[in-house]
Image (cartoon, rainbow, N blue to C red):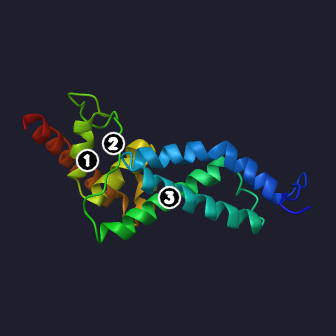
């Protein structure tokens, strides 16, 4: 029969991949959408890269490839890789900051346009360390490993990044 698709075999690996994609794509896209301060195109691109890695791993028979834990780990690595690549070229990328008990309380809603504009003033390295630590809620040691830094250097970077964000927020509030 021309023009009709071949029926899917039950239990075929592509069915498992498709079903996993259907169950998890919204969560992965939402993660990237938050982490890129609402940059839909970038979130879509990173989501696609993440699922490409998932498909390749599933085809190689990696047992964890179709688990959310594995997928979110890949997503974090894709985010880190993206900012490493672009931090050399661009210093004005946006990520979302999430409130933490370590950070000083902010005087207004952290999801506001003012906060997003303040983030745009930070370096890519500052935004990346803030996202990994506060949005992803990773321990400092894990952030350090992902960024290829020592724990002490990462803690110092976090202090500087929080200070830069606070200054940027104050500047935008005073403007």
Are dots 2 and 1 in contact, CB under 8 Å?
yes
Q: CA distance from mark 2 to mark 1?
A: 8 Å
Are dots 2 and 3 in contact, CB under 8 Å?
no
Residue 102 place in picture, x, y as percent: 31, 37
Using a 10 Å C-alpha cutoff, classify the residue at mark 2 as few (fewer than 14 neighbours), some (14 to 19) or many (20 or more).
many
Are dots 1 and 3 in contact, CB under 8 Å?
no
Q: CA distance from mark 2 to mark 3?
A: 19 Å
The residue tagged with tag 3: helix, strand or loop? helix
* Residue with the most extreme front position: 2
Using a 10 Å C-alpha cutoff, classify the residue at mark 3 as few (fewer than 14 neighbours), some (14 to 19) or many (20 or more).
many
Q: Nearer the viewer, residue 89 or 64?
A: 89
Q: Residue 46 got which mark?
A: 3
Q: Earlier in the sequence, mark 2 or mark 3?
A: 3
Instruction: Give the mark toward the camera: 2 or 3.
Output: 3
Residue identified by numbered label 2 = 97
**Which quadrant is home to the C terminus?**
top left
Q: Is residue 162 visible?
A: no
* Residue with the most extreme top position: 108
Residue visible at 41% across and 48% down in the picture: 35
The residue tagged with tag 2: helix, strand or loop? loop
Q: Earlier in the sequence, mark 2 or mark 1?
A: 2
Q: Is residue 31 left or right of residue 38?
A: right
Residue identified by numbered label 1 = 119
Residue 1 place in picture, x, y as percent: 92, 61
* Position above or below: 22 against 99: below
Using the rendered view, name the quadrant where residue 153 is placed.
bottom left
Q: Earlier in the sequence, mark 1 or mark 3?
A: 3
């Amino acid at each position: 029969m021309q023009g009709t698709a071949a029926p899917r075999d039950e239990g075929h690996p592509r069915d498992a991949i498709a079903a996993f994609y259907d169950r998890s794509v919204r969560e992965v896209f939402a993660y990237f959408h938050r982490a890129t301060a609402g940059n839909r195109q970038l979130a879509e691109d990173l989501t696609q890269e993440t699922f490409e890695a998932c498909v390749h791993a599933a085809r190689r028979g990696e047992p964890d490839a179709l688990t959310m834990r594995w997928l979110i780990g890949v997503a974090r690595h894709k985010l880190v890789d993206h900012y490493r690549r672009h931090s050399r070229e661009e210093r004005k990328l946006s990520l979302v900051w999430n409130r933490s008990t370590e950070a000083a309380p902010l005087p207004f809603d952290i999801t506001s346009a003012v906060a997003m504009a303040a983030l745009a003033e930070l370096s890519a390295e500052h935004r990346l360390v803030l996202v990994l630590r506060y949005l992803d809620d990773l321990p400092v040691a894990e952030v350090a490993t992902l960024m290829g830094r020592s724990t002490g250097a990462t803690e110092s970077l976090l202090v500087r990044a929080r200070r830069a964000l606070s200054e940027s927020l104050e500047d935008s509030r005073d403007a």
